[in-house]
Image (cartoon, rainbow, N blue to C red):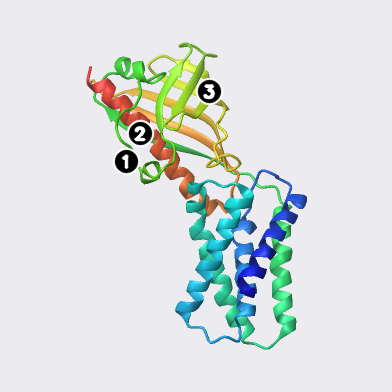
């Protein structure tokens, strides 16, 4: 029990200290999802070092300890269910890494080495939180619609409510999906709203309006959804229409976003997937409306 208790108390204390030292207060950094779980695994390995545990038992205990840590994140950080689902593989993987790495190291009866490695990881953790983190990305998707640009454009600025069921698995288990877009006008400066299935709304402003060619809008306010607040900012969206000259139109959807969670190599996979499926749900709806007229 000491392994579970002390590793999680340690993690909570370190996370609390992080808020005092971190430069980007709204950013969750690499070390919080990688170094800290490894340190938790090291602590567990220290308390379990004299027990004859099989590989399966060690993995089971590591997974349980990671689950306790994730539950504490939900309690103290107010994270949503989808966020916890996304972060779970990362936390579990590195707690297991720490447990097995610790077991291997603690077989060597060298307390100086043990303390040095632990302190090195701890110092690297706080060094990471003092570094400015910045990452932006753009996701683009295209779709050919069997209708001319004049027909497609009718449903680009604003579109009727989407009635079809969600296909993307995260939408199906509770992540909000886009259902409707409204606009106060068809000109630069007009307000636009993207409404999601749970009633949340992204407030937008049209910043480029080239009829039948280009609609670009800036996100002026996004909802305070626990699944996205503090993790990602949607910066801008865009629809580009290209006349293919044969009665069809190539519709391109672009979105720009800024991540506030690291490591990028893990979280951007999720961000791109979610953004892409938002695009495809809207674009498939536009395609259906355009082709039925």
Q: Alpha-carbon distance for marks 2 and 1?
A: 8 Å
Residue shown at the point (64%, 58%) measured from the top left:
31
Q: Which numbered marker is on residue 167?
A: 1
Q: Earlier in the sequence, mark 3 or mark 1?
A: 1
Circles 3, 2 touching at the beta carbon (< 8 Å): no
Residue at numbered disc 2:
281
Asked which quadrant contains residue 46, the reply is bottom right
Residue shown at the point (49%, 19%) measured from the top left:
192
Q: Is residue 15 left or right of residue 254?
A: right
Q: Position of residue 208 (x, y in %)?
A: 50, 18
Q: Quadrant of the N terminus?
A: bottom right
Q: Earlier in the sequence, mark 2 or mark 1?
A: 1
Secondary structure under badge 3? strand
Mark 2 or 1, which is nearer the eye? 1
Secondary structure under badge 1? loop
Residue at numbered disc 3:
204
Q: Alpha-carbon distance for marks 3 and 1?
A: 26 Å
Question: Can residue 39 be seen at all in this image of the molecule?
Answer: no
Circles 3, 1 touching at the beta carbon (< 8 Å): no
Circles 2, 1 touching at the beta carbon (< 8 Å): yes
Q: Earlier in the sequence, mark 3 or mark 2?
A: 3
Query: In the rendered view, would you say 100 is above or below 202?
Result: below
Residue shown at the point (55%, 51%) measured from the top left:
264
Query: In the rendered view, would you say 254 is above or below 192?
Result: below
Q: Position of residue 92 (x, y in %)?
A: 52, 64
């Amino acid at each position: 029990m000491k392994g579970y208790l002390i590793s999680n108390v340690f993690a909570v204390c370190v996370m609390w200290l992080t808020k005092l030292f971190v430069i980007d207060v709204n950013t969750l950094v690499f070390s919080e999802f990688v170094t800290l779980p490894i340190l938790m695994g090291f602590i567990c390995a220290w308390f379990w070092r004299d027990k004859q545990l099989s590989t399966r038992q060690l993995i089971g205990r590591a997974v349980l300890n990671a689950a306790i840590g994730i539950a504490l994140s939900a309690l103290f950080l107010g994270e949503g269910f989808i966020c916890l689902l996304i972060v779970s593989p990362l936390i579990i993987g590195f707690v297991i890494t720490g447990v097995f790495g610790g077991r291997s190291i603690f077989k060597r009866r060298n307390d100086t080495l043990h303390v040095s490695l632990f302190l090195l990881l701890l110092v690297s953790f706080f060094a990471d939180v003092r570094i400015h983190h910045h990452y932006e990305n753009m996701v683009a998707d295209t779709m050919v619609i069997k209708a001319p640009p004049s027909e497609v454009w009718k449903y680009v600025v604003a579109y009727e409510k989407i009635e079809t069921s969600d296909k993307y698995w995260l939408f199906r288990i509770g992540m909000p999906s886009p259902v409707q877009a409204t606009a106060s006008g068809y000109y630069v400066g007009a307000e636009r709203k993207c409404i999601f299935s749970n009633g949340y709304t992204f407030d937008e402003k049209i910043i480029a309006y080239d009829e039948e060619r280009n609609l670009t809008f800036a996100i002026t306010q996004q909802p305070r959804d626990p699944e996205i607040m503090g993790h990602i900012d949607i910066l801008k969206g865009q629809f580009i229409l290209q006349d293919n000259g044969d009665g069809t139109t190539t519709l391109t959807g672009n979105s720009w976003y800024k991540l506030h969670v690291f490591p990028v190599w893990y979280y951007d996979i999720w961000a791109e997937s979610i953004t892409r499926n938002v695009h495809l749900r809207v674009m498939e709806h536009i395609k259906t409306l355009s082709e039925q007229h």
